[in-house]
Image (tube, rainbow, N blue to C red):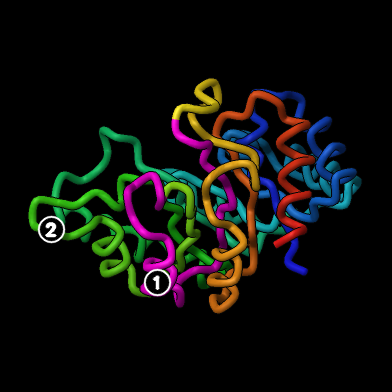
C-alpha cells in the first residue's frame, strides 16, 4: 500500500505545527513535505529540534519545497536543511507572477536555470524536480506550453506532478501522465470541489470529496517512478476534517 504524505503548507493557518504533527501521526500519515516557511530561517539546532518532533510522531520529512532563488543562492543551507531533516527529494515549487517569463524562449531559459540549479543537489544524492501550478499549461503565443519548455531546458530533472493544478490549467492529467510519466517522482494529491462549492476554501476539497478522478489516476500513476504521494489543500477551513477524511479516501484507492 502506498503511503500518504502531507504538505505542511496546508496547515500554515492552524498553528502550532507541533500539534499538527500529533494529528498526522495519529491519523496514520507516514511522511510530510516541508516548505521554505518552516525551515529556511532555522539554524542547525532548530532543524534538529524539528527533526526530533517529527521522529517523535513517527513522521519523516521525505521531501521539501525550496524557492528557486533560495536553491540558487543558499546551496549549502539548502543541503544542510535537507540532510538534517532526512529528505530524499527537493522540489522548486513556484514562480511568482512578476517573475514568470512572457514567452517560450523565457521559459526555456528558466528550464536551463533549473538544470544548472539541480547539479549540486543531484550530486549530493537528492532527487531534484519542479512542482507545477496551472500557469505552466497556458499556451504561449507560439502555441507551446511552459511545461514543455521547462522540461526541454532541464532534461534531467524530475516532476512533482500537482494533478489538480494540471486540471485547473485546463489540461488532461492522463495525457500528461502518459507524456511525462518518466519524469514523475512525486505526486500532489488534492481535490477540486464541484463548481460553485467550497468558495471559502478557494474551490478546493478534501481528497475524495471533489471531482478529480483519483482512483483512475492512482492506477495511471502506478506506472511511474513516483515514490511520494503528498496530500495538499491550499486553503482548508477545517484541518482535522481534511486530515482524517483525506487519508480515509486514499486508503480506498
Residue 12 in the image, given as x and y percentages of width and height: 64, 29
- Residue at point 57%, 29% (across, down): 235
Residue 131 location, x and y as percent? 45, 53
Q: Residue at x 49, y 53 (%)?
A: 162
Give yes or no for residue 147 being in the magenta stretch.
no
Q: Which mark is residue 1?
A: none
Q: Is residue 168 above or below residue 96?
A: below
- Mark 1 vs 2, N-terminal side: 2
Considering every residue shown, the one lying at the far left of the view is: 142
Indicate whether 234 appears above or below 227: above
Secondary structure under badge 2? loop
Residue drawn where x is 87% and y is 38% of the image: 22
**Residue 154 falls in image quadrant:** bottom left
Q: Residues in magenta?
A: 166-195
Apparent side of residue 149 relative to residue 77 in the rendered image (left or right): left
Q: Is residue 238 visible?
A: yes
Q: Where residue 26 sits: x, y (%)?
A: 90, 43
Q: Which residue is mark 2?
A: 143
Estimate how packed mark 2 is, as few (under 14), some (14 to 19) or many (20 or more) residues with alpha carbons within 10 Å.
Answer: few
Q: Tell me residue 145's x, y (percent).
A: 23, 57
Q: Secondary structure at mark 1?
A: helix
Q: Nearer the viewer, residue 135 or 198?
A: 198
Residue 84 seen in the figure: no
Q: Are marks 1 and 2 in contact (CB under 8 Å)?
A: no
Q: Nearer the viewer, residue 23 or 216?
A: 216
Instruction: Sort mark 1 into few (<14), some (14-19) or many (20+) by Cα contacts within 10 Å.
Output: some
Give the quadrant of residue 186: bottom right
Image disc number at residue 180: 1
Q: Give left or right: position of 195 versus 247.
A: left
Distance from the alpha carbon under mark 1 to that under mark 2: 19 Å
Q: Using the image as rendered, state which of residue 150 and residue 139 is in the foreground.
A: 139
Amino acid at each position: 500500500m502506498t503511503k500518504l504524505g502531507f504538505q505542511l503548507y496546508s496547515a500554515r493557518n492552524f498553528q502550532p505545527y507541533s500539534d499538527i504533527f500529533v494529528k498526522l501521526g495519529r491519523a496514520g500519515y507516514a511522511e510530510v513535505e516541508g516548505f521554505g516557511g518552516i525551515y529556511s530561517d532555522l539554524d542547525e539546532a532548530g532543524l534538529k529540534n524539528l527533526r526530533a518532533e517529527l521522529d517523535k510522531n513517527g513522521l519523516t520529512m521525505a521531501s521539501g519545497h525550496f524557492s528557486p532563488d533560495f536553491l540558487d543562492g543558499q546551496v549549502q543551507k539548502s543541503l544542510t536543511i535537507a540532510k538534517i531533516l532526512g529528505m530524499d527529494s527537493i522540489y522548486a515549487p513556484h514562480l511568482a507572477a512578476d517573475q514568470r517569463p512572457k514567452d517560450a524562449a523565457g521559459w526555456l531559459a528558466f528550464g536551463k536555470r533549473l538544470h544548472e540549479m539541480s547539479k549540486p543537489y543531484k550530486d549530493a544524492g537528492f532527487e531534484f524536480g519542479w512542482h507545477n501550478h496551472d500557469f505552466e499549461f497556458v499556451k504561449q503565443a507560439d502555441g507551446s506550453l511552459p511545461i514543455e519548455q521547462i522540461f526541454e531546458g532541464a532534461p534531467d530533472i524530475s516532476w512533482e506532478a500537482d494533478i489538480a493544478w494540471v486540471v485547473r490549467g485546463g489540461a488532461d492529467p492522463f495525457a500528461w501522465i502518459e507524456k511525462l510519466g518518466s519524469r514523475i517522482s512525486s505526486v500532489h494529491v488534492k481535490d477540486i470541489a464541484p463548481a460553485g462549492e467550497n468558495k471559502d476554501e478557494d474551490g478546493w476539497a478534501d481528497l475524495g470529496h471533489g471531482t478529480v478522478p483519483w482512483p483512475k489516476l492512482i492506477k495511471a500513476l502506478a506506472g511511474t517512478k513516483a515514490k511520494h504521494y503528498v496530500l495538499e489543500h491550499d486553503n482548508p477551513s477545517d484541518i482535522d476534517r481534511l486530515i482524517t477524511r483525506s487519508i480515509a479516501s486514499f486508503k480506498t484507492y
